[in-house]
Image (cartoon, coloured by chain):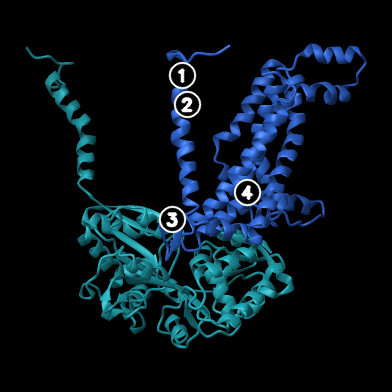
Amino acid sequence: MRRSISLYSLTFSLPLLIWQVLFFVFPLLFLIALSFWTVRNFVMSPDFDPVNWTTMYGRAVFWQAYGTTLALAAAAAALTSILAFPAAYAIAFKLSDTARRWAIFLMVIPFFTSYLVRVYSWQIFLSDNGIINVILGWLGLGPFTMLNTVGATMVGYLTLGFPLVVLLQLFSLIFIDRTLIEAAHNLRCGRLRTVFEVVIPSARTGLVIAALFSFILSFGDFVSPVYLGGGEPTTLSILITDTTKSGQQWPRAAVVALTMIGTLMIVAFGAIKFAYRGKST
Amino acid sequence: MKFTNGAGTGLTRRSLLAAGGAALAAPMLSRAAFAQATEITMLAWYGHAEPDMVAGFEAEHNVKFVPKYYTGGDNMLGLISQSPPGTYDLILSDAEYVEALNAAGYVEELDPNDYPLDDFFPEFQNFPGNWRDGKLFSLITRFGFLGVAYNTDALTEAEASSYNVFWDPKLTGKVGHFDWHLPNLGQMSLLNGNTIPYDIDEAAWEAVKEKTLSLRSQIGGFFDYGGTFSSLNDGQMLAFCGIGDWITGVLEKNGAKVRSVIPEQGGLQWSECFSIGKGSTKADLARKWIQHTTSAAGQAQTAQMAAYPALIPNARGWEALQASNPDEARRQGMTADAGNAMDLIRSGRIQYRQWPIQQDLETWNDFWSEYKGS
């Protein structure tokens, strides 16, 4: 059936469309144009020269940073999802309604404070003379180098994504049809098997979307790799700042940014396709 | 008929309304008084328009500084190029970027007679980049040295007095880089024996790259301004390449066990210069500010800036600092004693930080990215 466009539907959809065009499409088009500009003596001039693309794509350090960023973000998405699931599961199935509301409230609280501040506070825990090493010292262990490592970067990614992933998983889990779980139990399906055979497949869409958000947030994050990872290994976000320090090379930074946007779009479409596979819309 | 709210108070409704009206209007009056203060815009590194630096000048001239802080010369040039002429009345720039400001026509010409240039040490009266074709476009107001920054619990001054200390096995994973190619690679170039570290031929550049790469396994991280402070302060990094007293001086004053030393291979000099922005409608006030900050008293003040301390080019400023804060004058080496900051320059142990001369800036930066990723 062909849908007619009514004034009513336009009233609600137009603001969103205008918003997207103004704040996503226009900047994106500008970014694409910028990537073909040239820079001479710190002055950018409009041009149509592919030199920035060939230069950036011809550099080993770019692909190294790309691979590192992709791997770190994928690891963060997997780790966050695995760690968040038991929490979301417990909140969804084991807590009373009141306790669940409190748990949701507690998961929202981290968003009240700046991410940068939370990351800086991790330094106090993770440094060589930090809280964790002091406690380990009491037990006769350590000190262990934790700050300025990939592990510390991962802690930062978890700080960024964990509360959101728990919430997204939770909203997916609480809408699972409980009769399916009861049916599984009635058919003598064990608890663990029920989780893997019934709960996870039923909540697949939410779980994948949650992991996707974790991936997106980690992929573009600059704060954790710099302040917890000590700036190494170089991620794409760090490469952008490095590039702009080389005589106003914003066009080359635009190449990195567009590559990041392209990658995120491919991952997002792939994830959404997987999330909704086999479901009628 | 007289309305009163009580016998003997003498408070009439009219007087009450008048008093209330006056009370309500008072904030507006004070706002009007504030509004009269002329706003003057300053593009600078963080700290230059903070109260410890500008409060006195603001009160004296009834002005209000509106700062726009940047991090790095590229950032500064980007901000200027994206703003219409007249956006910034005052521009503070690192010396290596001053020529770019001149070349792009972003700054007004200055009259040398307006400023106490005769009080400056001779080395700073014709400071490179400040002049072009015999015309003055900017004025150096502060500078500092970059050497080896170190944790005093981990290293002695004698140990830190060579860039080779960065390769010391006991510092593996504990050497930090300030994340900017220019000072780090300049120091590597000094270590390789290049007299003018930024004017090196291809063979010397290859040798600098090789030397730098050999340091990679010692490096614990690449840090920005904030990260450099915190990693030195909490002892996470025990030695630092590419910085100097502008970082460690602040930490030292707050009790951290860190210091900077100019090693035997020599150090680098950073320099900050003030200019008046092209098209400024408050050029007169901007001129007064530069006069203030280059005066003896203003120089003593800027030497002790809370955000980061610096050396000063005005000899009378040294005297003013020695009189007002002899400890700080001694700490920074701005005394009449032998081996002071000027002696370091005059003995040839200090070289200007500048853009590479025989390679382009991109070449150095691209190598820096590769080094970080290696």
Q: Could you give the CA–CA distance between mark 3 and mark 1, rounded to whole angstroms?
A: 39 Å
Task: Say which quarter of the image contains residue B114.
Answer: bottom left
Q: Could you give the CA–CA distance between mark 2 and mark 1, rounded to whole angstroms?
A: 8 Å
Circle 1 — which element?
helix
Q: Which residue is mark 2?
A: A16
N-terminal of the pair, mark 3 or mark 1, is 1
Q: Which residue is mark 1?
A: A12
Circle 3 — which element?
loop
- Three-letter code, disc 4: Ser
- The chain letter for the residue carrying disc 3 is A
Q: Is residue A140 left or right of residue B99?
A: right
- Three-letter code, disc 1: Phe
Q: Which residue is mark 4?
A: A224
Q: Verify CB contact (< 8 Å) between mark 2 and mark 1.
A: yes
Q: Position of residue A202 (x, y in %)?
A: 77, 21
Q: Position of residue B70 (x, y in %)?
A: 43, 56
- The chain letter for the residue carrying disc 1 is A
Colour of chain A in the image:
blue
Residue A47, numbered label: 3
Q: Position of residue B1 (x, y in %)?
A: 6, 12
Circle 4 — which element?
helix
